[in-house]
Amino acid sequence: MKTLILSKTDVLQLINMRLVIKEVEKAFNEMASGLTKMPAKSYVALEKGDFRAMPAALVDASGVKWVNVHPQNYFHNLPTVMAIIIYNDPETGYPLAVMDASEITAYRTGATSAIASRYMANPKSSSLGLVGAGRQSLTQLEAHLELFDLERIRVFDIDEKRAQKLVDKYSHLPIQVAPIEEVCDCEIICTTTPATKPVVSYRWIKKGTHINAIGADAPGKQELETQIIQKAMVTVDDIEQASKSGEVNVPIQQGEFSVSEIAATLGDCIAGHVDCRFDQDDITVFDSTGIAIEDIAVARAVYTM
């Protein structure tokens, strides 16, 4: 038996956002039904970034993703995030495939946010705010376009040229570079920065807003002012992982928020265990740390094509 080797080009020829949304939602449903196995990701901290090992087993699939996060790679003309997945036969452990997972990571993260928005945001939401204009912002936008009719898209980045580059790429859409306060006036907000101090203030957030907090994916990272977390209905992708390395990790460590205040997991929302579409005046937050079941679910779809 040969191990299939798939390059980034190979993977891009096999996936699309609609497929990824379907597979990720299915994986979260499996997780909520107790059909998956997934320890929290482990970290190797380095001076300029870190590595993460992310293993998981689904009903009929298993594997591990090895991924880096180096925020300064932008200055080296390299992606911030690069990854590979070893996809295994769960019955024998045989490595069925080794595939580039950089695009899988980007796609599944965008897909997960859009799924969270579908279950938590006002279903009639027509405005999207992007805080951060790096690679991940593209798939956040593309995934939300699959599920929402967007009439207003606003983008902010501390590097205005990078924000303008994103706007130029999607010039056929109603998209503009805007101050962060205007971006935060949108009904759905996606934050994708590597911030270790809050960049989104509570005073900018109106009632009924849904926020997908994506950038905080390691201990010490925080994008949202703690008051937002305290006032919002918060769901997470995985409670153990989010409490240690997600948007809620800093408020928890500082004693300003507790694990017991997390309303639900996204899997519970999808499986119908919890109604996550809260009162229309509630602020809702999805704390997305990125979990291995998302990656292995997409790898399963790629391998079986």
Image: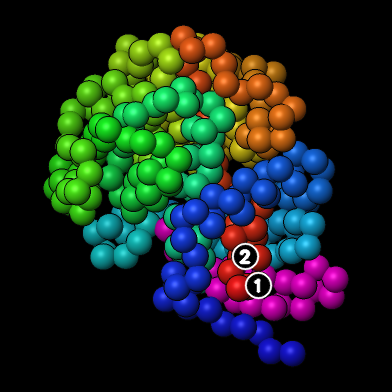
Of residue 121 and residue 203, the one placed in the foreground of this image is 121
Quadrant of the image for the C terminus?
bottom right
Judge whether 131 appears above or below 254 on screen: below
Magenta span of residues: 81-99
Magenta region, main secondary structure: strand
Residue, x 39% and y 26% (percent of image)? 125
What amino acid type should be assigned to the residue bearing mark 2?
Answer: Ala
Q: Which residue is mark 1?
A: 304
For residue 35: magenta? Answer: no
Give residue 301's mark.
2
- Identity of the residue furthest to the right in this view: 91
Task: Say left or right for 282 vs 168.
Answer: right
In this view, 52 is above or below 236: below
The percent position of residue 150, horizontal first and vertical second, equals 32, 35
Give the residue type at disc 1.
Answer: Thr
Q: In which quarter of the view is residue 267 placed?
A: top right
